[in-house]
Image (cartoon, rainbow, N blue to C red):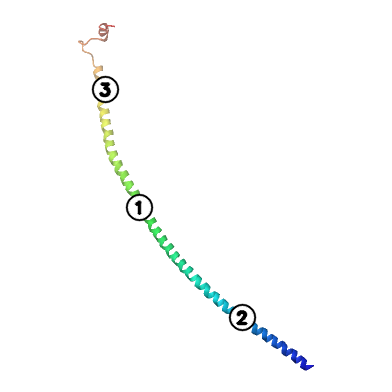
Amino acid sequence: MTDVWLAIIAVAVAVMAAIQVGAIVLGLRLARRVDQLTTQVERDIKPLLHNLTTISAEAQRAVQLATAQVERADRLFGDLALSAERTMALAAQFVGGPAQKGVALFAAARAAMSAFRDLREASRRRPRDHRMASPDDEESLFIG
């Protein structure tokens, strides 16, 4: 009976050994398959990574160009605002100078008119010459 037990143990050990060898063989196949898959993924991803690198470099270049354009536009609008301010100041001087002279001429004309009016009123206040006809005399000459 001990021989039977020994035979059963031997068969069990052989089966376990076969299972272990099978597991090792399957593990090796799996390792080989994973290695092939890794190689294929690396081969397929390399161009993609290269394209992504190229795209990111182009995007960086585009951002730099856009930044330069925005800075250039900012300088342009700053210069334009400065030019507009200078132009408005020159226009104010151009229009304001003659306008001030025109106001001065208008004031001089008004002063002259006022002086003539004062002269006329002063002449009315003076006693009339006897040789001049009175308003009553002038009404008798009116035909109407």
Q: Where is residue 103 in the image (x, y as percent from the top left)?
A: 28, 33
- The residue depicted at 32 percent of the width and 48 percent of the height is 83
Front in this rendered view, residue 54 or 26: 26
**Disc 2 from disc 3: Cα separation:** 126 Å
Amino acid residing under circle 2: Gly
Q: Position of residue 35 (x, y in %)?
A: 55, 77
Q: For the view shown, which residue lies furthest in the left direction?
A: 131
**Disc 3 from disc 1: Cα separation:** 60 Å
- The residue depicted at 77 percent of the width and 93 percent of the height is 3
Residue for badge 3: 117
**Disc 1 from disc 2: Cα separation:** 70 Å
Q: Quadrant of residue 20?
A: bottom right
Query: In the rendered structure, are the residues bearing label 3 and label 1 in contact, judged by CB atoms less than 8 Å apart?
Result: no
Residue for badge 2: 27
In the displayed structure image, the side of residue 140 where residue 77 appears, left or right: right
Q: Of circles 2 and 3, which is in front?
A: 2
Amino acid residing under circle 1: Leu
Task: Tell me the SS state at disc 2.
Answer: helix
Q: Position of residue 44 (x, y in %)?
A: 50, 71
Q: Which of marks 2 and 3 is nearer the N terminus?
A: 2
The vertical placement of 55 against 107, above or below, is below
